[in-house]
Image (cartoon, rainbow, N blue to C red):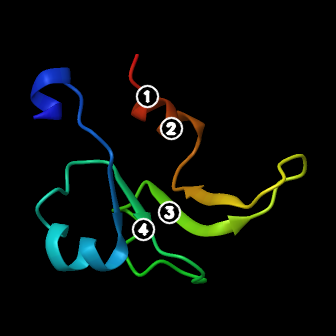
Amino acid sequence: YIELKTKVKPVIYTGLRFYEDYLRGDFDGYPLWIAHYHQAKLSVDKSRWNFWQHSDKAKINGINHVVDFNAFNGDSTDFERLLVK
């Protein structure tokens, strides 16, 4: 519905287990953001994910509470391609 109305493929945000059990193979053409905390490595093929939410306990100077830590799988050009303009 979102894609039909906006003409943009939405980023799919999911936990690793839900992705493996229900989404893998069905949404391969969509940008993927996987939440899987406190692991040194993500067990999904690197060519498959765009964002990895690695932690919900990161600290940043100037912010008085913990924040999410996300890694992007690509460079600035890859990131620009994901932006809606």
Left or right, 27 with reference to 61: left
How far apart in space, not on screen, are marks 3 and 2 (Cα)? 14 Å
**Mark 3 crowd level (few <14, some 14–19, many ≥20, 10 Å Cα):** many
Q: Amino acid at mark 3?
A: Trp
Q: Which disc is residue 83 wearing? A: 1
Left or right, 39 with reference to 82: right
Marks 1 and 2 in Cβ contact (< 8 Å): yes
Of the residues under marks 4 and 1, which one precedes in the sequence?
A: 4
Of the residues under marks 2 and 4, which one precedes in the sequence?
A: 4
Which residue is under mark 2? 79
The residue at the point 59 percent across, 58 percent down is 70
Which residue is under mark 4? 46
How far apart in space, not on screen, are marks 1 and 2 (Cα)? 7 Å
Marks 4 and 1 in Cβ contact (< 8 Å): no
Of the residues under marks 3 and 1, which one precedes in the sequence?
A: 3
Left or right, 35 with reference to 2: right
How far apart in space, not on screen, are marks 3 and 1 (Cα)? 17 Å
Which residue is under mark 3? 52
Quadrant of the snapshot with the N terminus: top left
> Whole-percent x and y of residue 61?
90, 51
Q: Amino acid at mark 1?
A: Leu
Q: Quadrant of residue 33?
A: bottom left
Q: Amino acid at mark 4?
A: Lys
Q: Observer-nearest residue: 29 or 54?
A: 54
Q: How many marks?
A: 4
Of the residues under marks 3 and 4, which one precedes in the sequence?
A: 4
Q: Residue furthest right?
A: 61
**Mark 2 crowd level (few <14, some 14–19, many ≥20, 10 Å Cα):** few
The residue at the point 24 percent across, 48 percent down is 30
Q: Amino acid at mark 2?
A: Phe
Secondary-structure class at tag 2: helix
